[in-house]
């Protein structure tokens, strides 16, 4: 591994989301695990299993952290204090770790004419003076003359084994930009999740809904648009719902989860039985009312305005924003600085073909949410229920169109200010202008105000829709620090082209033999413009091998080519469902997070082709997606103006400038490390499975389309529905009326079915529930 200062190397050794920073490490972290037997091996995960632990190998595990800036004429420290010997045993036994009893460091190569030496070689943290530009190799050797250690109560003889660290010293370092806001935005005031009591949730939900009663109720009385809540945070899951209740949906929901910022965490229900989701809140909006171009991609941020509700279909009735009335999705993507951007101090602008890391914000408001608010159905959105005299009563329905006539204010959080990065390296530098531009017509333009708090800078956006009369409103805002580089920070262009899809199971054969798949199916990628593209919305149309001819499914059809900086990964995701009326089937998903290096290697050895098997957490369709990912037309260098060149030069560090490095967690960084980042495991990118994986464990629950829906009609067992209907049929007149409407809705669903097989599914269900419902409540028979 070579330690250098290129943007791609700046995050070596750390997991990144789409490659966006999370940490900017100068220059690298080396992780090597060496086996006592020939070759390299990766140690198994620790396990609680016990068994025959009497045999196994011993491995060296070392993470060599380079502390310092690799500038010729300066020194760096090599921190190997985490070096351990690990016992790798059979039968998945525990893997104990012990300290390395004896070791040595050696400088085994250096540039010609260099007089560099290692100092402090008897410790685990030696220093190396980089007296010349070029490559240096430092070797750590454990047990150089063999040693004996005790592993799992037995003495083991360990032969010498080593790990090398490569360091490249350079003459100058231009501080690379960060690509997205700090995770968690630690400068924001924090709130705690709301601890709703079980009795409060049950009372407001009237013990559950989705068949005869409201499936969603507001957490408190809703009296108008001033009562919409604002949720802001980072996107985790984002996908099409596998199944939704036909009693209160015109179309399937698009579901996404938001890891809430501090001020928004009060909107999350406290979940003691699910601590890993402590700050995560779900958002759902019917897909027919939420266009693809506004849907978030995992890793984006979002500002969501909408109804704060209890989901009465999912015990124990936790909170959601459902439905939204407005969403602003903030995508960390490249932004082009136009030649006409000429802030103070830049009379000639920044030049031509200038790209910088920025945030693309897509704003969308819609008065319409779908059936949840369209017709005051028994199971739609309602005010909270209550208990009166020992009897539960539902609240009144909330009927759309949803009013949006108010001012909506949200935030666009930028990556850290480059000047702050320089200051943390002991340097001063001139300020960098912020570029903003608003695109779109119809209705008022947003107002954008710059805000600061300590080292943090962000944009406060207000949209005054008080006098707006349209049904929908949208805008796009481009925002970025105008921090240029002649090479455009290594920006690359990639073309994604779908080749074919081999369908192993179309989803119609899981319960019984039926026709070909009735798929609604999307592909999602991070191209900044058209991130969600619908591929199928048809009946009996998917089977065997589906091909995507280049004339109809090129990169252009999936949106523009992807423009990504070296640290930004390529995201290829699929999501959809097989429409089977009463019970739909998940198509399964592909979740590919691909580095530039992986894409280049595929082009070298595999004609740029990628083959990814779908997976899901329960019964679903099964397919392998074949797609091509190859470099597109080069972005090229920027033609910088004299002012832009001077700005870039001011952010260049040389050995004689007195630069310093502040070690945090023994890593030289350009940004403060948020400790919560190390614990962040909620993102689907962390849960990508190997191709062909068919089931997942509890740790990957976020990849499930939806949790088990005990009360919701689409997931409820037939016996549960029968009990609900039987009880209501003997209840108050209002309850018997709801039973009659329920039966009529099922019959109407059968009439709407486009295929005979699906119609038979619904009619079979209807015949079953009729057995427990009095005849006078039956719908007219066929």
Image (tube, helix red, strand yellow):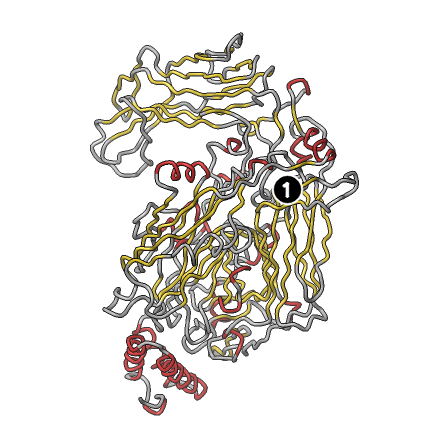
Position above or below: 619 against 685: below
Q: Is residue 20 visible?
A: no
Q: Quadrant of residue 243?
A: bottom left
Q: Residue at x 33, y 36 (%)?
A: 45
**Residue visible at 33% across and 59% down in the picture:** 546
Residue picked out by circle 1: 353
Q: Would residue 499 appear left or right of 494 to someone viewing this image?
A: left
452, above or below 126, in the image: below
The secondary element bearing badge 1 is classed as: loop
Disc 1 packing (10 Å; few <14; some 14–19; many ≥20): some
Residue 310 drawn above or below residue 553? below
Q: Residue furthest bottom?
A: 776
Q: Position of residue 485 (x, y in %)?
A: 63, 34
Give the quadrant of residue 321. Answer: bottom right
Quarter that holds the C terminus = bottom left
Q: Residue furthest front?
A: 551
The number of callouts visible is 1
- Residue 462 in sight from this viewpoint: yes
Q: Quadrant of the N terminus?
A: top left
Q: Which residue lies at the image location 58% right of the left edge and 57% below the top edge? A: 231
Dividing the picture into quadrants, the one containing residue 582 is bottom left
In the rendered image, residue 778, in percent from the top left (x then y), is placed at 34, 88
Nearer to the camera, 576 or 182 = 576
Left or right: where 681 falls relative to 638: left
Residue 545 is situated, as x and y percent measured from the top left of the image, at 30, 58
Q: With 130 as the anchor, is 441 left or right in this view? A: right
User: Residue 33 placed where, x, y %?
Assistant: 36, 26
Q: Is residue 516 left or right of residue 728?
A: left
């Amino acid at each position: 591994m070579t330690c250098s200062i290129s943007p791609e190397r700046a995050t070596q050794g750390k997991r990144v989301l789409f490659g966006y920073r999370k940490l900017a490490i100068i220059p690298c972290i080396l992780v090597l695990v060496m086996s006592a037997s020939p070759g390299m091996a990766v140690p198994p995960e620790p396990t609680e299993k016990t068994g025959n632990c009497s045999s196994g190998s011993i491995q060296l595990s070392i993470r060599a952290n380079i502390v310092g800036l690799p500038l010729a004429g300066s020194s760096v420290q090599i921190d190997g204090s985490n070096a351990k010997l690990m016992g790798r045993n059979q039968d998945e036994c525990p893997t104990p770790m012990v300290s390395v009893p004896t070791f040595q460091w050696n400088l085994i190569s250096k540039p010609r004419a260099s007089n560099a030496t290692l100092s402090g070689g008897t410790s685990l943290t030696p220093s190396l003076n980089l007296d010349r530009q070029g490559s240096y190799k430092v070797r750590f050797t454990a047990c150089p003359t063999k040693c004996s250690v005790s592993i799992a109560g037995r003495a083991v003889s360990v032969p010498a084994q080593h790990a090398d660290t490569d360091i490249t010293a350079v003459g100058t370092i231009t501080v690379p930009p960060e690509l997205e806001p700090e995770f968690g935005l630690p400068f924001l005031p924090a709130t705690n999740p709301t601890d709703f009591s079980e009795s409060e949730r049950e009372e407001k939900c009237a013990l559950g809904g989705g068949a005869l009663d409201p499936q969603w109720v507001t957490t408190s009385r809703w009296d108008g648009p001033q009562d919409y809540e604002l949720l802001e945070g980072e996107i985790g899951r984002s996908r099409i719902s596998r199944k939704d209740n036909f009693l209160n949906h015109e179309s399937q929901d698009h579901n996404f989860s938001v890891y809430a910022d501090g001020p928004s965490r009060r909107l999350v229900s406290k979940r003691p039985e699910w601590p890993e989701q402590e700050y995560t809140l779900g958002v759902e909006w019917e897909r027919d009312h939420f266009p693809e171009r506004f849907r978030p991609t995992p890793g984006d941020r979002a500002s969501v305005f909408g109804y704060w509700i209890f989901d009465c279909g999912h015990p124990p009735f936790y909170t959601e924003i459902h439905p939204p009335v407005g969403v602003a999705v903030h995508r960390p993507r490249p932004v082009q600085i136009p030649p006409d951007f000429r802030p103070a101090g830049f009379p000639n602008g920044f030049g031509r073909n200038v790209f910088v890391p920025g945030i693309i914000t897509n704003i969308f408001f819609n008065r319409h949410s779908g059936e949840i608010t369209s017709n005051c159905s028994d199971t739609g959105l309602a005010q909270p229920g209550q208990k009166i005299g020992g009897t539960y009563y539902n609240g009144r329905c909330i009927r759309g169109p949803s009013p949006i006539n108010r001012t909506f204010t949200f935030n666009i959080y930028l990556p850290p200010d480059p000047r702050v990065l320089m200051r943390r390296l002991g340097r001063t530098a001139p300020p960098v202008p912020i570029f903003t531009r608003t695109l779109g017509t119809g209705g008022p333009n947003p107002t954008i105000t710059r805000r600061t708090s300590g080292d943090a800078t962000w944009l406060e956006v207000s949209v005054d829709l008080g006098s707006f009369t349209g049904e929908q409103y949208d805008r796009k805002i481009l925002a970025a620090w105008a921090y240029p580089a002649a090479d455009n920070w290594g920006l690359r262009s990639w073309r994604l082209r779908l080749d074919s899809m081999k369908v192993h199971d179309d989803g119609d054969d899981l319960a019984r033999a039926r026709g070909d798949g009735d798929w609604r199916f999307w592909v999602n990628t991070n191209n900044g413009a058209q991130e969600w593209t619908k591929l199928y919305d048809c009946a009996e149309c998917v089977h065997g091998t589906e091909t995507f001819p280049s004339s109809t499914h090129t990169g252009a059809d999936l949106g523009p080519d992807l423009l990504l900086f070296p640290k930004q990964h390529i995201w290829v995701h699929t999501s959809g469902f097989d429409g089977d009326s009463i019970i739909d089937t998940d198509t399964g998903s592909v979740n590919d997070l691909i580095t530039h290096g992986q894409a280049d290697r595929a082009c070298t050895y595999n004609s740029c082709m990628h083959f990814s098997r779908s997976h899901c957490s329960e019964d679903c369709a099964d397919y392998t997606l074949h797609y091509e990912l190859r470099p597109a037309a080069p972005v090229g260098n920027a033609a910088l103006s004299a002012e832009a060149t001077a700005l870039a030069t001011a952010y260049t560090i040389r050995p004689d400038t007195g630069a310093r490095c502040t070690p945090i967690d023994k890593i030289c960084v350009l940004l403060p490390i948020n400790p919560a980042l190390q614990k962040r495991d909620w993102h689907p990118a962390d849960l990508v499975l190997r191709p062909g994986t068919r089931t997942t464990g509890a740790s990957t629950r976020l990849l499930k389309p939806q949790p088990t829906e005990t009360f919701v009609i689409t997931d409820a067992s037939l016996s549960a529905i029968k009990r609900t209907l039987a009880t209501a049929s003997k209840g108050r007149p209002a309850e018997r009326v709801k039973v009659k409407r329920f039966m009529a809705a099922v019959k109407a669903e059968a009439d709407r079915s486009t295929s005979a097989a699906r119609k038979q599914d619904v009619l079979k269900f209807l015949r079953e529930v009729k057995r427990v419902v009095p005849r006078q409540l039956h719908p007219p028979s066929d």
